[in-house]
Image (tube, rainbow, N blue to C red):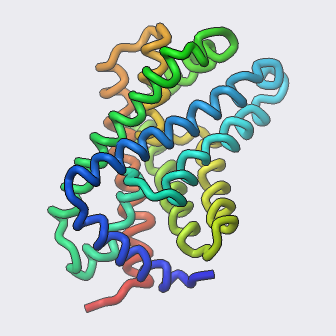
Amino acid sequence: MNTPKEVIEIVSKIAETKGKYKVSKTLILAFLAGAYIAFGGLLAIIVGGGSPGIAASNPGITKFLFGAMFPLGLILVVILGAELFTGNNAYFMPNVLVKKQQIGTVFKNWGLVYVGNFVGAVFVAYVITHLTHLVSNAPFVDAVREIAIGKTSHTFLVTFLKGIGANWLVCLAVWQGMAAKDTTGKILAIWFPVMAFVAMGFEHSIANMYFIPLAIFEGADITWTTFIVKNLIPATLGNIVGGAFFVGTLYGYLYGKTK
């Protein structure tokens, strides 16, 4: 297992590489990451959302089932290599602290990756899920609509705070994945924190780029404006704080090189 200091060294090298990608490569890898996260969301809907009987008597079990399926997305991102906005919130911070990379490089990467993630997630929502009618019938369509209505029903502050919790755990999952040296260890390291944040009901902006547009395509009474204002903006800001500060900055300060 890699030590926390060794993980920071790995993170630093990965961030330098990410900062040098061509725009086209960044966008393609970001599209793939958005699609991978969406596949995890779809699996969660099929298994967790497809168990209304269990949900009625043991709601905690269906939350666990939902959470247990979702990590597929981040596992694919980390093992196969892709550009995920929420993971990248943490990657660059150790280098920024020691002025190895400029903040402009970070914002360029975040912006491109965010757009690519959105396109990938919505592509899977519309083309792979909606057009194939995978969730068009009960109980799946009911679960899809319920998820989206719940996610757009909170105040800005609540969604922002839930966004912090989500990406704090997501980036810890990525960090743990880099601490492991074999594929099995990486999968287990990623699975537990991601399962936890989903089961606890936190808000992940990229996952919501799949869940809420899918609900809109499936006829939920939600507008794109409601999606963006009530969920995507506060969740994204919370994700940035959770990943960039609570993981990237704090661990970079504790274990990174100082000038």
Quadrant containing the N terminus is bottom right
Residue 180: % across, % down: 61, 73
Pick the front one: 87 or 13:
13
Q: Residue at x 30, y 65 (%)?
A: 18
Residue 256: % across, % down: 38, 84
Pick the front one: 12 or 243:
12
Q: Residue at x 21, y 58 (%)?
A: 22
To which quarter of the image does residue 69 belong? Answer: top right
Q: Residue at x 37, y 24 (%)?
A: 227
Residue 13: % across, % down: 35, 77
Residue 174 appears left or right of 249: right
Pick the front one: 105 or 62:
105
Residue 222: % across, % down: 41, 13
Residue 41 appears left or right of 242: right
- Residue 195 lies, with reference to residue 101, above or below; the image says above
Quadrant containing the C terminus is bottom left
